[in-house]
Image (cartoon, helix red, strand yellow):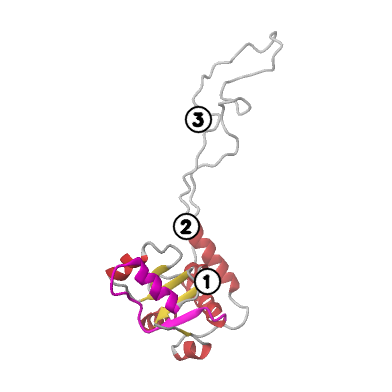
Amino acid sequence: MSATILTSEAAKAANIEIITNGRYTQAVHETVVAYRANRRSGTASVKTKATVNGSGSKPWKQKGTGRARAGYRSSPVWRGGGVVFGPHPRDYSKKVSKKTRRIALLKALSARILAGDVLMVPTFAVATAKTKEFVKLLVSVSPEPKTLIIGTEFDNTTKLAARNVSPARLMTSADVNTEHLLAYKKIVLTNEALTELAARINK
C-alpha cells in the first residue's frame, strides 16, 4: 500500500479551511498546556512543622546550656522536621473553551498539512494480528516509525498487531486532539477519517 501527501487543495476540497498565516498560535499553546495540566494528579504532599510526628515538648531549657534556643523537635531546621513551602495537594486543571480547542485543532492540522506531514490512505488494516505485518504496512505508507495513524475505527486484529510498536499509535478521528497532531513526525489519515475530522472541526 502506498500513501499520498494531503495537499492544501485536497484539504480544502474536504471542507477543511487551511490557516496559512501566523494567527491562532496562542490557542494551540493554551490548549496543549491545558491537556498536560489536566493529566497531573496534584497529589504531591509534604508535612509541615505542624503535621510532622514529633513531641511538642521543649528539647532543653531556654538558657544555661550553651546551645542554641530550640522550642520543638519538628522544627524545619532539624533533621526529621517539617518542610517549609513544600507541595500540597492541589488542582492543576485548566479550562479551555470549545471554540479555542476547535481553532487549535484546525491550526495544528493546517501546520502539518502545509509541512507535507499528513499522508492519505484508503484504509489501514492488517489481515493477521502479527507485529511484523503491522510494521510492514507502516513502512509502506510512512517513512517515519513515529507515526500517528488516524481512522474512524480499527478492528481488533489491527489493534493487536500494533500494540507492541511503541513509536506508532492508532487513534480514531473522534479522539485525536491538538497535542496528538503535534507529537508525531508523520500523520496517516484514512479517507473516512478525513471526512469525520472535517465534520468535527466545522461543527
Residue type at mark 2?
Asn
Pointer 1 or 2: first along the chain: 2
Residue type at mark 3?
Thr
Q: What range is drawn magenta here? A: 115-141
Question: Is residue 87 depicted above or below 126 in this figure?
Answer: above
Residue type at mark 1?
Lys
- Tell me the residue at 45%/88% (across/down): 15
Q: Is residue 186 magenta?
A: no
Q: CA distance from mark 2 to mark 3?
A: 29 Å
Secondary element under disc 3, as helix, strand or loop, is: loop
- Tell me the residue at 56%/78% (across/down): 111
Q: Nearer the viewer, residue 88 or 137?
A: 137
Q: Nearer the viewer, mark 3 or mark 1?
A: 1
Q: Which residue is mark 2?
A: 38
Q: Residues at badges 2 and 3 in contact (C-beta under 8 Å)?
A: no
- Numbered mark located on residue 185 in the image: 1
- Numbered mark located on residue 51 in the image: 3
- Tell me the residue at 44%/75% (across/down): 139
* Residue neighbourhood size for the residue with mark 2, other residues' Cα within 10 Å, grouped as few (<14), some (14–19), many (≥20): some
Secondary element under disc 2, as helix, strand or loop, is: helix
* Residue neighbourhood size for the residue with mark 1, other residues' Cα within 10 Å, grouped as few (<14), some (14–19), many (≥20): some
